[in-house]
Amino acid sequence: MAERRYLEVTVGTNIVMVLDHRTVEVFDRTAASTSEVARWHVEHIAVKAKPSKSGLKLTIGNRLADDTIAIAGPRASLTVPPENEAAVVAFFDEVKAARM
């Protein structure tokens, strides 16, 4: 059985992302970053990151076979401030490692 991972990372003051074993959830107290319930299995999550002047712009959604993000389904879009970037990159490294 795979090791049970649990990890949380805070982005700014409103967003908490959680890796609970093989499930990723994005909690936003303002609900500004999510389009639906933002919850994915590690096998089904895709993350697109682009650097910007204000930080790292992330788009998170359902992963297609070619590793792109599906248009349909839950999505989260957020900007990670520079002071949180290293922790968020490490978080998604752990998400990727949790895949089979």
Image (tube, rainbow, N blue to C red):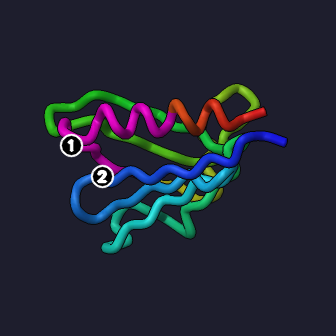
Residue reaching furthest to the right: 1
Against 31, is 86 above or below? above
Magenta-span inclusion, residue 97: no
Instruction: Tell me whether circle 1 and circle 2 mark residues in contact (CB < 8 Å).
Output: yes
Foreground: 81 or 62?
Answer: 81
Against 14, is 98 above or below? above
Residue on which disc 2 sits: 11
Against 71, is 90 above or below? above
Locate residue 34, reporting x and y percent.
Answer: 45, 63
Mark pair 1, 2: CA separation: 7 Å
Q: Crowdedness of circle 1 by 10 Å Cα count: few (<14), some, many (20+)?
A: some
Residue type, mark 2 in image: Val
Using the image, tell me which numbered label, if any, was put on residue 92.
none
Q: Residue at x 52, y 30 (%)?
A: 93
Magenta region: 77-92
The quadrant in which the C terminus is found is: top right
Locate residue 94, reporting x and y percent.
Answer: 55, 35
Q: Residue at x 78, y 40 (%)?
A: 2
Locate residue 17, reporting x and y percent.
Answer: 45, 55
In screen coordinates, is 43 left or right of 61? Answer: right
Residue on which disc 1 sits: 81
Badge count: 2
Magenta-span inclusion, residue 80: yes
Foreground: 8 or 57?
Answer: 8
Residue type, mark 1 in image: Pro
Mark sitting earlier along the chain (1/2): 2
Locate residue 98, reporting x and y percent.
Answer: 67, 37
In screen coordinates, is 48 left or right of 61? Answer: left
Q: Residue at x 39, y 41 (%)?
A: 58
The quadrant in which the N terminus is found is: top right
